[in-house]
Amino acid sequence: MAIKKIMCFCGSGLGTSFIMDMNIKKVLKKNNITGIEVEHSTIDDVAPGAADLFVCGSDLVANAQKAGLAIGLNNMVSMPELEEKLMKVLNENK
């Protein structure tokens, strides 16, 4: 299943999820990947069908996995960690 929508989320849907949103867009641009919508939200919006891939802190990944494919980040502002995990999932789901 190709990834067409990514939802970043945190507890409040403000700071951390917005940073992850911006960083995902940077990774996609760096790797010349287009056609993927990226949005940030709160944990309350995580539900099956809300996105093809959920990205969050590792402490919330269990919640995301109930809704679908998910990446949990140990350091939510680490570009290397994000790029490694995101590209692995995108390459596995072409």
Image: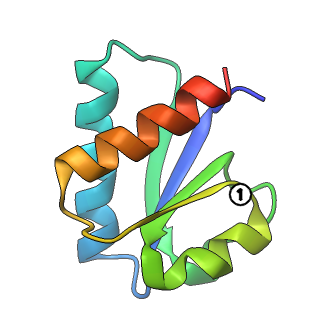
Q: Position of residue 87 (x, y in %)?
A: 43, 32
Residue 41: image location, x then y, percent: 47, 69
Q: Residue at 42% of width from left, 45% of height from top? A: 85
Q: Is residue 88 left or right of residue 30?
A: right
Residue that label 1 marks: 50
Q: Quadrant of the C terminus?
A: top right
- The residue located at (27%, 67%) in the rendering is 76
Q: Residue furthest top?
A: 32
In this rendering, position of residue 70 left or right of residue 84: right
Residue at 61%, 49% (x, y): give it: 53
Please identify the quarter of the rendering in which residue 26 is found: top left
Quadrant of the image for the N terminus?
top right
Which corner quadrant of the image does residue 29 belong to? Answer: top left
Q: Does 64 appear above or below 28?
A: below
Rendered position, 91 above or below 59: above
Amino acid at the residue labelled 1: Ala
Figure label count: 1
Q: Position of residue 88 (x, y in %)?
A: 49, 35
25 w.r.t. 51: above or below: above
In the rendered image, residue 49, in percent from the top left (x then y), is placed at: 80, 55
